[in-house]
Image (spheres, coloured by chain):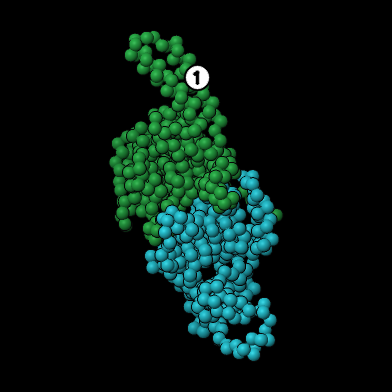
Chain colours: A cyan, B green
Amino acid sequence: MAWFRKERRERTTTRQRLEIPADAWDKCDQCGHTDIRDKFDRNLQVCMECGHHRRIDSRRYVAILTDPGSFTELYGTLGSVDVLGFEGYPERIAVARRKAGTQDAILTGHGTLTGVPINLGVMEFGFMGGSMGAVVGEKIARLARRSLEERVPLIIVSASGGARMQEGAMSLMQLAKTSVTIAPLKQAGIPFISVVTNPTTGGVSASYAMQGDVNIAEPGAVVGFAGPRVIKQTIGQDLPDGFQTAEFLLEHGMVDIVVARHELATTIARLLRMMLRREPLPASS
Amino acid sequence: MAFELEFEKPLVDLQRQIAHLKRLAEEQRLDVQSEVAPLEQKLSELRREIYADLTPMQRVLVARHPRRPYALDYLRTVFSDFVELKGDRLFRDDPAIVAGWARLGERSVVVIGQQKGRDMKENLRRNFGMPHPEGYRKALRLMHQAARFQAPVVTLIDTPGAFPGLGAEERGQAEAIARNLEGMARLETPFVATIIGEGGSGGALALGLADRVLMLENAIYSVISPEGCAAILWKDATQKERAAQALRLTATDLHELGIIDEIVREPDGGAHADPDEAGRALGEALDRALTELEPVPRDALLAARAEKFLRMGRFVEA
Ligand SMILES: [Zn+2]
């Protein structure tokens, strides 16, 4: 499991720096630390200096959370339709598909994690801000049903601005639709792990993202129902430092645990193995 | 009449004219029936005409009308024997949601609804009908209580939406709504929700995952307010007409989309023109829905509730 390996920090000498082309450098927008782009990438886009977690796409989370070669995509051909005749929506879908390179705002499939079969859904923020319309709702509903039928744990990684406005109340109903498929998992004793990443707001935070047996947050992720901008507008003052961050949610009892990206797979694997009464992971991992 | 909507102005003028004539008749002991009758006829025709042809944004204004009947009004007219129960048993009572036991005809039910204020003072106390997490948690507590006593749950939805404030976020309104959705999905008792005014986003749905979803004719139900939608999409809140149109938030739209099950007709001129008549229609619709749901075995009820929401959403599959 290559993703668990800690990168050893190397000193870059001025000499080396000069030999590297300018576009190979990257800068952390949290602390300003500058380093080789590839190093950021090998560190799962977590800043080597301050630990800031940058956004990564759905494919990357699949690579982190499944054993190499084990993942098979499901429901990949589902596509959004302009159900309301909402002006500009078809164009926005087309642009989003080009930009994000995904069919819609979630990638779903099955695989294994340290050999444990899982059903995995990862939201794609790059697709219209990870907004939840009928496709996201349907894919999660199918995945949860599959988990129920096969008695396989469900993991959903969220990153979303909320319900997709262009599908009107139909997008709001996806909160209900996903909830009616997740509720039976609880009764059947099938683990559902929710991972919330930056940002998870609106309708997604008010449905499956907060319904996990275990809710895990990535460090620094902004999670809440109302977005920070809207709250600021309502109360007419600046928000306190760290408001709605993962650490704030942890302190207020809304998430179980804040886990760094490097530890995400092992933490989930350890939990699942205990919940499912399977043997522990070998100490080396 | 302290408040009038722009498009209601011709109605208000006519009403004033009629009132004036009647006062005159009384003072001077005149018979004005021949003058009043045609005016009253005209008034009811005009009322029907105006209300038959409201734009979506006009309907939004009717749904928000400050004289529109609220949950507590229906609790007086449609229900009897109401005993209000308060508090979430965790933090505090949320006056933006009222709840308790009541009778609908013969049957005992638990009624839960968002409640707006009639004046500024009451609105501050009730937070304009925008619940805090405590409100959702109180609602779920009493839904569970209803199920324990095998009583149906009736919700009356009327909220601009969840409250974007510090306390609401700090105390986890996302989690509270999410937990309600899960709780309602498993609630083992007949459950009818009615949108009586504004069905604002997650704050509305937090009381809305029901076996039957009814909607008053002039109510609205939307993922976002027209003003909010316009501000986000066109960076211009004055485009709310355009947004109200695009969002398809009227009862007719939502019925066509299969999101609600039934439209409850309002009297001409809207529920605020004749609250008793609005209440009568609501009571009848609730009674009909509950009569259908009560004999259904609980597991079949839950399966049908899930199935109903599973059908929502259109997509293509290559
Ligand atoms: Zn940094």
The residue that appears at 45% across and 66% down in the rendered structure is A245
Is any atom of residue B307 visible in this view?
no
* A97 shown above or below B188: below
Front residue of this view, candidates A208 and A185:
A208
* A275 shown above or below A35: above
Tell me where residue A22 appears, x and y as whole percent: 67, 79
Front residue of this view, candidates B201 and A64:
B201
Query: Horizontally, is B239 left or right of B73 in the view?
Result: right
Q: Where, by quadrant of the figure, is residue A103 drawn?
A: bottom right
* B82 shown above or below B140: above
Q: Quadrant of the N terminus of chain B?
A: top left
The residue that appears at 40% across and 34% down in the rendered structure is B67
The residue that appears at 30% across and 46% down in the rendered structure is B85
Front residue of this view, candidates A9 and A281:
A9
Tell me where residue A154 appears, x and y as whole percent: 53, 64
> What residue did someone put label 1 on?
B42
Tell me where residue A196 appears, x and y as whole percent: 50, 65
Is any atom of residue B91 visible in this view?
yes
Tell me where residue B269 appears, x and y as whole percent: 47, 28
The residue that appears at 62% across and 46% down in the rendered structure is A86
| SS label for mark 1 | helix
How many labels sit on residues? 1
* B141 shown above or below A121: above
Q: Quadrant of the C terminus of chain B?
A: bottom right
**Residue type at numbered disc 1:** Lys
Q: Which chain does the numbered disc 1 sit on?
A: B
Graded by Cα atoms within 10 Å as few (under 14), some (14 to 19) or many (20 or more), the crowding at tag 1 reads some
Query: Horizontally, is A213 left or right of B100 in the view?
Result: right
